[in-house]
Image (spheres, rainbow, N blue to C red):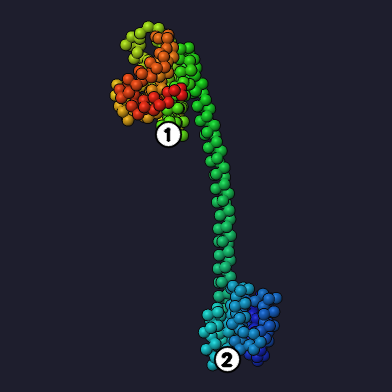
């Protein structure tokens, strides 16, 4: 088996033949080129491990040849052949990537050991390149896998988001259907939640609230009396005045509504408004007795809308509803007590659009 492939490029036949004999005897394959052009041709057509290159070629610049060889094979080992006192040629040759030099006339032991060292270096460089290449390939394959994974995650996230939104929609539709059924249970309050939603929505838009908050208020209005599901029919439909105990039971509907919705964590803001829709600006409301700005703005808006609709619709305890002007006057009178004055001001501005 060959110890390595050597190409000698030297116009002096004597030294090149000598190197060939030395190396062939030690098991290397050796080719000789007698000028630069032949050397470049031979390099292009044969596999070469080490080039012995005379720095004194006349037909081609050896430095140019070194650059070309390195371009074609980054791991090529080049040993310079120089005349006895031409060490000055070496500085530039080294800067071009020459591995070592041998002085003419070549000494057998020096040639052999230089070649052996050069061959070890060649193997080391090739192995490093292979390792680097496989690392790069692995990197590229990892990057590809990363991209694919990212795409899959993106798709799954999209699907999940869609599923979540569908589920949310289904929940909302179910609950709203339930709320409508509760509205319809008592023919007096039929469409009550719808009216409250409409009024509150007009006020919220007039106040310049953001879309998300308006949506929250809309949902809360549609669901606000959901807790009445737990109030006895006879109390809801009672024509006369409620006893204190009966009134206490009615009051529970705000808290019960919030409790029913509690598992739906995405409705956090809506639940807060439902719970607070009977709180009063002066702190005299229920279930907690919150005051002023402690009450969610949505609940403060809804309180006005809710009371206005209750006054202008027929109720078991009042078959003839109040006229619009009377109801407006009543709301105005309660500004700062039951209602937030800022909300009442907006109500007065938009009530003609109800
Ligand atoms: Fe209510
Ligand atoms: Fe209500």
**Residue 303 place in picture, x, y as percent:** 38, 23
Q: Is residue 157 above or below residue 262?
A: below
Q: Quadrant of the N terminus?
A: bottom right
Q: Quadrant of residue 341?
A: top left
Mark identifier at residue 208: 1
Q: CA distance from mark 2 to mark 1?
A: 93 Å
| Label 2 Cα crowd, 10 Å radius (few <14 / some 14-19 / many 20+) | some
Q: Is residue 218 above or below residue 155?
A: above
Q: Quadrant of residue 136?
A: bottom right
Residues marked 2 and 1 touching at CB (< 8 Å): no
Q: Quadrant of residue 93?
A: bottom right
Q: Earlier in the sequence, mark 2 or mark 1?
A: 2
**Residue 115 place in picture, x, y as percent:** 58, 81
**Residue 81 place in picture, x, y as percent:** 59, 87
Q: Nearer the viewer, residue 128 or 298?
A: 298
Q: Is residue 255 visible?
A: no
Task: Tell me if 78 is positioned left or right of 350 in this view.
Answer: right
**Residue 122 place in picture, x, y as percent:** 58, 74
* Residue corresponding to mark 2: 83
* Residue at (58% x, 53% y) in the render: 144
| Label 1 Cα crowd, 10 Å radius (few <14 / some 14-19 / many 20+) | few
Q: Nearer the viewer, residue 282 or 123?
A: 282
Q: Nearer the viewer, mark 2 or mark 1?
A: 1
* Residue at (53% x, 80% y) in the render: 95
* Residue at (32% x, 20% y) in the render: 333
Give the SS element for disc 1: loop
Task: Tell me if 212 is positioned left or right of 300 in this view.
Answer: right
Q: Nearer the viewer, residue 291 or 23?
A: 291
Give the SS element for disc 2: loop
Q: Is residue 211 visible?
A: yes
Q: Is residue 41 above or below residue 316?
A: below
């Amino acid at each position: 088996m060959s110890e390595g492939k050597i190409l000698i490029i030297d116009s002096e036949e004597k030294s090149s033949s000598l190197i060939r004999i030395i190396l062939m005897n030690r098991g290397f394959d050796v080719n000789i080129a007698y000028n630069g052009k032949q050397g470049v041709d031979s390099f292009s057509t044969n596999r070469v491990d080490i080039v012995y290159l005379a720095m004194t070629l006349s037909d081609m610049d050896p430095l140019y040849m070194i650059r070309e060889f390195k371009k074609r094979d980054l791991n090529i080992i080049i040993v310079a052949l120089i005349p006895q006192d031409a060490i000055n040629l070496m500085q530039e040759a080294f800067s071009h990537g020459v591995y070592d030099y041998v002085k003419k006339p070549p000494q057998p032991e020096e040639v052999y050991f230089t070649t052996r060292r050069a061959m070890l270096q060649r193997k080391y460089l090739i192995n490093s390149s292979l390792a680097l290449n496989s690392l790069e390939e692995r990197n590229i394959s990892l990057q590809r896998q990363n991209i694919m994974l990212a795409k899959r995650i993106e798709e799954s996230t999209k699907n999940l988001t869609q599923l979540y939104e569908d589920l949310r929609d289904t929940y909302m539709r179910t609950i709203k259907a339930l709320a409508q059924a509760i509205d319809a249970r008592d023919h007096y309050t039929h469409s009550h939640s719808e009216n409250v939603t409409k009024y509150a929505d007009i006020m919220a838009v007039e106040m310049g609230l953001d879309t998300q908050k308006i949506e929250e208020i809309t949902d809360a209005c549609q669901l606000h009396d959901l807790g009445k599901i737990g109030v006895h029919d006879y109390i809801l439909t009672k024509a006369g005045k409620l006893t204190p105990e009966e009134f206490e039971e009615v009051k529970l509907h705000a808290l019960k509504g919030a409790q029913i919705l509690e598992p739906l964590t995405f409705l956090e803001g809506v639940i807060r408004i439902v719970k607070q829709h009977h709180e009063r600006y002066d702190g005299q409301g229920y279930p907690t007795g919150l005051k002023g700005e402690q009450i969610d703005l949505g609940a403060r808006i809804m309180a006005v809308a809710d009371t206005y609709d209750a006054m202008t619709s027929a109720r078991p305890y009042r078959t003839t509803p109040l006229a619009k002007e009377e109801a407006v006057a009543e709301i105005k009178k309660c500004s700062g007590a039951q209602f937030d004055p800022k909300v009442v001001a907006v109500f007065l501005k938009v009530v003609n659009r109800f």
